[in-house]
Image (tube, rainbow, N blue to C red):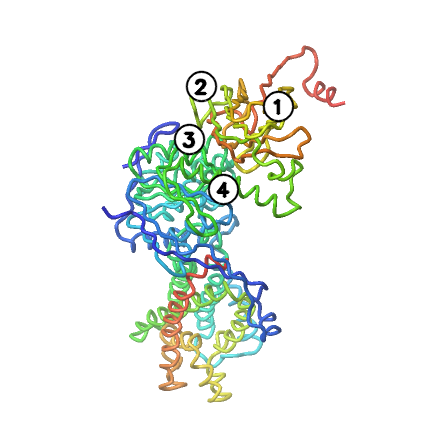
Amino acid sequence: MTVVAQGSGTLEAIPRPKSVVQRDLNLVRELSITAFKLKYTGSALGYVWSLVKPLMLFGIMYLVFSILLRVGQKQPDFPVQLLVAIVAWTFFTEATSTAMNAIAGNGDLIRKAYFPRWILVIASTTSALLTFAINTVLIVVVTLALGHLDLGWRSLLAPVYYIELIALVLGLSLLLSSLFVFFRDLGHIWEILSLVLFYGSAVVFPFTLVYDYSHKLAAIAGVNPVAQIIQDLRHSLVSPKIPPMASYIGVLEVVPILISVGVCVLGFAIFHKLTPKFAESL
Amino acid sequence: MKPIVEVSKLRKRFRLPLDKSTTLKYRVTHWRSSSRYRDLIALRDISFDIPEGQFLGIAGPNGCGKSTLLKILCKIYKADSGSARVNGEFSAFLELGVGFNPELTARENIFLGGAMLGLTRAQLRNKVDEVFAFAELEDFAEQKLKNFSSGMQVRLAFTVAILAQTDLLIMDEVLAVGDASFQEKCFDIFSRYKREGKTIVLVSHDLAALEEYCDRVLLLNRGEIIADGPANEVTTAYHRMVADHALTVQRDSPSERLPRGSADSGAKAVEIVSVSLLDEQDQTRGRFDTGASLTLDMKLLVHRDVGDFVCGMAILRADGLLVAGTNTFLDQVTVSSTAVGKVISIRYTIASLPLLAGGYVVQLTAHDFTGSKTYDGAYPAASFHVNNMGGHVGLLEMLGSWKVAHEDGVAAGAAVRESAT
């Protein structure tokens, strides 16, 4: 027991919780709450910005694709599809680009203190996830109230797709954050790749557009997990009339799911392998 | 009983790249040259144990591997071979306030800093008021950390750092370079931990502090343990090593030659055989208060008659800053070497020590009047610590006085302007 007198009063030291898992989870919680808070403190609208950004993107995309280009006019509830997709995409891109810096941007912490390094990446992802969760709930509640969501038994699969998205984002975050320490071009490379993914995943137009143009192209685009997740989310949340990804690519549907799981496992493996080199390289 | 720290054949090598190759362009344009690097061996197969309850000091010149050793103990670096095991909970203070965020309030930072130590929010919630009371920051709980003075930040960081119960405390010297009052607090904590029988590892340049607190000191040089034993023995070895090294450097490189000339030109006609620091009662001490009396007592053994010579002393701060120095010639005191084989006792008394809190070392030389022949020299010859008395800051007690007068009939602003012109 440590009792130390200084100035006024004494201070008794606290025993740490026995469970290491409990300590680690607590640190994840503190770090993600901090990141979440810091992102929105100091600005007048605060959290609202995280909603304004995807809504703005939605507004522009709706104007360009739905009104000017008349894309998806035959599709039921295309604006709602657009909204669901954009919110998921915003999470994907913000989470991965923020996580890129989770290790490289915390050099001081890594050189001066010991804690499992993956905590920094998980905290960064959790913080993005928090914003995503609130946005998703808001949008689902509002569109449901307006009668634009046609929910059914198939909707029970929506959480599975969200979990797949989270696994993919987590895996990519672990990969990007650890590789970025040694290879700084990755920042630019990922920006370009994200742009390719944005259009390759049919975020702002119906996937049918790709399919009608070329079945082969649809098969290539369709095996990318982002396209599959977004298409299947549309199917399960918005309307049964929207075809799920399986109806475009058939049994190839397993490929994107395997990729998501694989990226997650690979992310943990590579991160684990590179961890001992972080402190020396930063 | 199992030792709390077991280090066995620990080896650590750093590869320092000779060119930076972290960008794609570089990799592409230099794809042929396998990346070039220089190996730096920071630790060479060192082994030691720390029994529970020991206060271990680690000393050594810059680049000797002490920080690397500490970081391996704290699991920040991974050893290339060998092992370092800590059997128990440890707290590491390599730097205070790691993980604190200036944009958050003091209260939020307690939760964050506590979490870095492994404490949960639930545990900390009941503790927050105590922390603020202890750090004397009760009125600033909801202030953002960035608005704190550096002293307030250090108080908060230190209080949080000692919050977690621990079996082993690992501290880098960063703690000793804070302001004087903070340094004193650290030493208070050391004493208390020592009394409670906790195991502590302290890396420091401050030999006086190591001597005062440590049961045992490891002396590292070039990645090897070159001395291991009771604090006073090892610090003596360190003094000798530094002195030897200073002389070697002097002989080897002309650019480092000091004006006093090389040491072998009249070597050891007079030898400094002992040095001690005494208080008013002639008691040997390692710590002094500002304003107290300090007497430097040195014994010189005369080997050869070189006539009258000069004996010089200087006080340096632990980091090497020359604080003050004088010699017998400047102060018009005669020292003669006529009694060959006899010991000369020389005392230099500072009636009222003007130094403020910190660690200091003493340098001694015996040389001829022109300074071209050095008979003997010792650096550091001795080291001491000045206690913190609170209040004044910096290096020296200025012994100044204030005078404030209120003049009638003149507006305050006008008075200022007047005095400015």
> Crowding at label 2, few (<14), some or many (≥20) Cα neighbours within 10 Å?
few
The quarter of the picture where residue B321 lies is top right
Labels 2 and 4 positioned on one and the same chain? yes
- The x, y position of residue A73, in whole percent, is 49, 79
Q: Quadrant of the C terminus of chain B?
A: top right
Labels 2 and 3 positioned on one and the same chain? yes
- Label 4 resides on the chain identified as B
- The x, y position of residue B49, in whole percent, is 32, 48
Amino acid type, residue under disc 3 in the picture? Glu
- Label 3 resides on the chain identified as B
- Horizontal side, residue B126 vs residue B147: left or right: left
Q: Earlier in the sequence, mark 2 or mark 4?
A: 4
Towards the viewer: B136 or B176: B176
Compared with residue A59, is residue B240 higher up or lower down, i.e. above or below?
Answer: above
Residues tagged 1 and 3 counted as in contact (Cβ below 8 A): no
Amino acid type, residue under disc 4 in the picture? Met
